[in-house]
């Protein structure tokens, strides 16, 4: 945008008009303050009733909290943290996950994750899981989560990136 | 004069020998520095003691069945969606890396259930085979699992106040390494990195691999 203004500096009126139009467009789009990126679900072994979803929560707005989650793929979705203390790993249920203003929170293997409890069917690699995250301020955010076979080397993971409009 | 000189040489020689012997004794009495690994290697392996479990094919499994190969032993449960799959993926990678790096070493991987109420042999078989067709699952009575876990330096417990169907189990995140005699030789502490564990195993195998 800075470059655009610079190239149009010889015609200030047009530059101002363009900037004005862009501002109007941005306001009209009302960009959500919370973005979910790099979401993936671990493909599950046969017979297993639980699954895990990982993602990054980017907060471009004020302080918020992830307070709930649900998915048609599971009986329930819980916010969990794998906590390691004295060599013992314990999963703890979290009622609300704070996301500070302008901060990002990463849900990653071995740490905070969304636990899918009571899977309707095993999660097969290549499938998608519909997931709704509920934030205290931003409200509900629907995410389509690709199921990834995590047995492959990490470099081979194909995480879905959110594409931002140019 | 000459005599005095030879006496002093004799004393010096005797002293040198005495110091040498003392140093040798001291070295024998003092443990050599342990191998530096991501965890700890026991200079003297620790036998596991008796236990009786059942493997993922429904066959009786006792301490004797750990003999003849190196065993990586991890304690977890199939209901665990995060840390257990993560560790088993690493262990599958460890096994592959050891096959390339230390091809002479026979290695087996065991996933011991800390949740026998939900983990039947059938369920364990489906679960461990998913990560590697050669992985073994072990389950059985809580008391027998506890005997093996404690001997391998691991603990587990069910935190109170949970639903009887969806309860979670807390468990050690370490991986035990048994030598071919069946005794505990090393414990790898989390977080586990397959390249690190395979490199540590190569060190352990180089120092203790020839012993029985």
Image: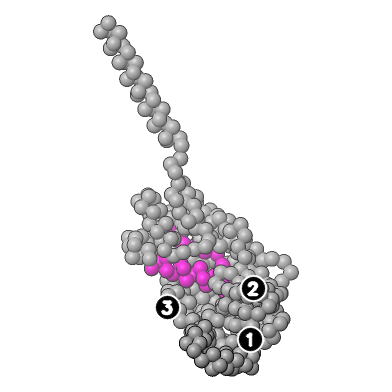
Q: Which mark is residue B67?
A: none
Distance (Cα) linking label 2 and label 1: 25 Å
Q: Residue B188: give x, y in percent of width and height.
A: 49, 58
Point out residue A89 in the picture as x, y percentages from the top left corner.
60, 64
State the colouring used for the structure image: one colour
Please give the count of numbered marks on the rendered protein: 3
Question: Residue at the left extreme?
Answer: B2
Q: Marks 3 and 1, how far apart in space?
A: 31 Å
Camera-nearest residue between B61 and A127:
A127
Left or right side of B94 for A47: right
Q: Is A69 situated left or right of B17 in this image?
A: right
Q: Chain of mark 3?
A: A
Which callout, 2 or 1, points at the residue further toward the start of the chain? 1
User: Going 53% across and 61% down the picture, which residue do you hit?
Assistant: B190
Q: Is residue A131 in the magenta section?
A: no
> Magenta segment range?
B67-96
Q: Label 2: which residue? A: A80
Tell me the CA gap for discs 2 and 3.
26 Å
Chain letter for mark 2:
A
Question: In percent of the image, x 42 and y 35: which residue is there?
Answer: B28
């Amino acid at each position: 945008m800075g470059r655009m203004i610079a190239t149009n500096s010889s015609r200030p009126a047009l530059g101002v008009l363009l900037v004005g139009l862009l501002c109007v467009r941005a306001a009209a789009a009302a960009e959500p303050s919370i973005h979910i990126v790099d979401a993936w679900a671990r493909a599950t072994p046969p017979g297993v009733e639980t699954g895990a979803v990982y993602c990054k929560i980017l907060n471009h707005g004020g302080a918020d909290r992830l307070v709930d989650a649900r998915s048609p793929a599971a009986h329930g979705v819980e916010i969990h943290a794998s906590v390691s203390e004295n060599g013992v790993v314990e999963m703890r249920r979290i009622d609300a996950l704070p996301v500070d203003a302008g901060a990002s929170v990463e849900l990653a293997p071995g740490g905070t994750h969304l636990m899918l409890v009571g899977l309707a069917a095993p999660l097969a690699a290549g499938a998608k899981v519909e997931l709704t995250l509920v934030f205290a301020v931003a409200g509900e955010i629907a995410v389509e989560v690709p199921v990834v076979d995590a047995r492959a080397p990490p470099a081979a993971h194909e995480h879905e990136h959110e594409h931002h409009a140019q | 004069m000459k005599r005095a000189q030879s006496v002093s040489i004799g004393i010096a020689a005797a002293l040198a020998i005495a110091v040498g012997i003392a140093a040798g004794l001291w070295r024998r009495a003092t443990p050599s520095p342990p191998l530096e690994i991501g965890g700890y290697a026991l200079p003297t392996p620790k036998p596991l003691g008796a236990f009786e479990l059942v493997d993922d094919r429904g066959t009786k499994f006792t301490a004797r069945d750990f003999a003849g190969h190196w065993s990586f032993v991890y304690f977890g449960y199939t209901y665990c969606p995060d840390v257990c799959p993560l560790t088993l993926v690493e262990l599958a990678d460890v096994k592959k890396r050891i096959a390339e790096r230390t091809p002479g070493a026979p290695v087996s991987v065991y996933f011991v259930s800390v949740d026998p109420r939900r983990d039947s042999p059938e369920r364990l078989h489906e679960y461990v085979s998913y990560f590697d067709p050669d992985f073994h699952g072990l389950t059985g009575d809580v008391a027998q699992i506890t005997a093996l876990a404690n001997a391998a330096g691991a603990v587990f417990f069910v935190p109170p106040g949970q639903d009887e169907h969806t309860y979670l189990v807390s468990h050690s995140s370490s991986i035990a390494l048994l030598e071919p005699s069946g005794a505990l030789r090393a414990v790898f502490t989390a977080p586990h990195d397959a390249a690190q564990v395979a490199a540590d195993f190569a060190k352990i195998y180089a120092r203790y691999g020839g012993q029985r």
